[in-house]
Image: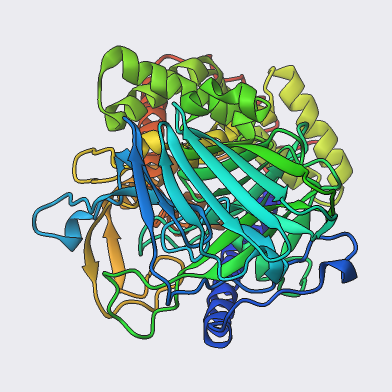
Amino acid sequence: MDKTGIIVVSICGALLVWWFVEQNKIQQEVARQQAQFAATNHAAAKAVNPASVTPPAAIVTVPVIFNTNLAEQTIVLSNAKARYTFTSRGGGLKWVELLDYPQTVSARWKSKGGDQTNGVASLNTMASVPALAVLGDPGLVGDGVFAMTKTPDGVRAEKSFPGGLRMVKEFHLGSNYLMQATVRMENTSGQPLALPAREIVVGTATPMDADDNGQAEGAMWSDGASATDQPLAAFAGGGCTRSAPKTEIIGGTGKVAWVAAHNQFFALMAMPKEPAQQMIARPVTLPQFDNVTETNVPLPGGIMAALVYPKGTLTANSTIEQQIVLFAGPKEYRTLADIGAQFQNRADDVMGFGSFYGFCAKPLLLAMNWLHDVTRLGYGLVIVLLTVILRAIFWPLTAASTRSMKRMQALAPEINALKEKYKDDVQKQTQKTWELYKKHKVNPMSGCLPMLVQMPVFFGFFTMIRSAIELRGAHFLWAADLSKPDTVLMIPGLSFIPFISTPDGLPLNVLPLLMVGTMIWQAHLTPPSPGMDPSQQKLMRYMPLLFLAILYNYSSGMALYMMVSTLASVLQTKMTKNQSGPAAPTTNPALTPASKLKK
């Protein structure tokens, strides 16, 4: 790599460091806003006048607190996949427990007994507003208490308001984590009724456990053609645009096909039969987790998302109805693909595969699951097997690159001689160098080609592992959960080390350390480019330390992939070196010593 390449790599590394620092600032700002929000908004809900808003979107300014002095009625329904708890406070779905997924998997250093689970994963947990609650004008909320009755295949909730308005909700459980819901407004009077603008809550994206920093939480919506995702950090402002913090984000222009509130692995998604006018998302502060005893820890945050409907008029003895399909389950690609027709086949968007590298992430996920189904191996061994297969696919390209670099090394004396001869004429030096490359059929860019080709695969793996729920709780050697760092112990008192420390101290994550060790080993085995000075060579050899800062607290599955990929590269380098490569180009003795170069 020449000096220009070194500069480019250094700039990229500096940008990555800046990005991580900026993300840390955003998280701190989110935590500060949540604490401030919690301190000032524990009063009863208040609403703004919908008539003063154009378009009618910003309806509720703080989370609704229902009348807790009245007894709460709950109805629990279950099927093979989930347990649904409905509440009279808001007349909606209080939370959903997913029976096939543990709530969390503790790191081995946290418990002597190794892997520990704590209940099952749940959605809308700790949220103050149930899914499918109706918010807006106080006349549509009242005390928020509904009469609940159990039906043969679901639940019915109803509430009457002054003036003859009655709200009726019906919920019917289905399969594949689906539920059919109907929200009906009935005018039981003989006079027209003004129906205010309103929101139907989809649900609240909440952290999965106390270790979840909320970075993967988001509110997503689609117009049927494309999807938009707004993470929790988007409400904090800052970043490249230095935007101000936001108390709400409004999306859609009269055609909202579906809305989702999601965290890293689970989602609440609502698709109305008729598109909603808009969607709205707000950051909310949640109660502290039960297992957190420290008083200085910021309260967890979530994102509440809702469908927005405009105001209208209900004629005498008429009704208006919204039919909604609600998905409350895992962001598991095959499950989402099975129900794709109900959500415009947007499984790729929900999984986060709509990015530039999504075209690699999806095939990698499908390949990983296929290998797991065929071999019946654990996901750790499947990642190893998939990595080896990928390296085998790229083997010819990498081998050709290594051979080309060996030929370039053989040309190093002549290249250095040309540099000495034309040191005062850079243009002439470049021309003669390229003529030498052409004469001996050497491509100096061949060393970069394997890296450029494999870069989309790297980012595809990065994207895939971040969203693959299959790795949640998957074991491999000492790693209890391949979707989390493989922390084996925590070193207290070392919380000041940038990028890799945590508030609890310095985690000892073994796989990232092994990964960086193999990368440094590979760098020492890789022949340097001709003309690279020793300081540049040393810089390139220790560039893997940048990966340590980036991936140290990332998924251990990613560190496993990088380590195995690097080991395969080391093996290939050694095998290629041991092979008898092409003969070294014949060097003109008259050109080798700089003192004998002819002008």
Quarter of the image with the C terminus in it: top right
Q: Percent position (x, y) of residue 121?
A: 34, 48
The quadrant where residue 408 appears: top right
Q: Does residue 411 appear in the picture of this structure?
A: no
Q: Percent position (x, y) of residue 55?
A: 88, 59
Residue sitting at x 67%, y 77%: 46
* 333 up-or-down from 467: above or below: above
Q: Percent position (x, y) of residue 143?
A: 56, 71
Asked if residue 308 lies left or right of residue 424, the reply is left
Q: How many marks?
A: 0
Comparing 369 with 531, the one in front is 369
| Residue occupying the far left of the picture | 113
The quadrant where residue 10 appears: bottom right
Quarter of the image with the N terminus in it: top right
Residue sitting at x 33%, y 28%: 384
* 18 up-or-down from 596: above or below: below
Comparing 335 with 589, the one in front is 335
Asked if residue 324 lies left or right of residue 556, the reply is right
Comparing 325 with 289, the one in front is 325
* 345 up-or-down from 204: above or below: above
Q: Does residue 191 appear in the picture of this structure?
A: yes
Query: Which color scheme is applied?
Result: rainbow
Comparing 534 with 290, the one in front is 290
Asked if residue 163 lies left or right of residue 409, the reply is right
Residue sitting at x 67%, y 58%: 11
Q: Percent position (x, y) of residue 560?
A: 35, 39
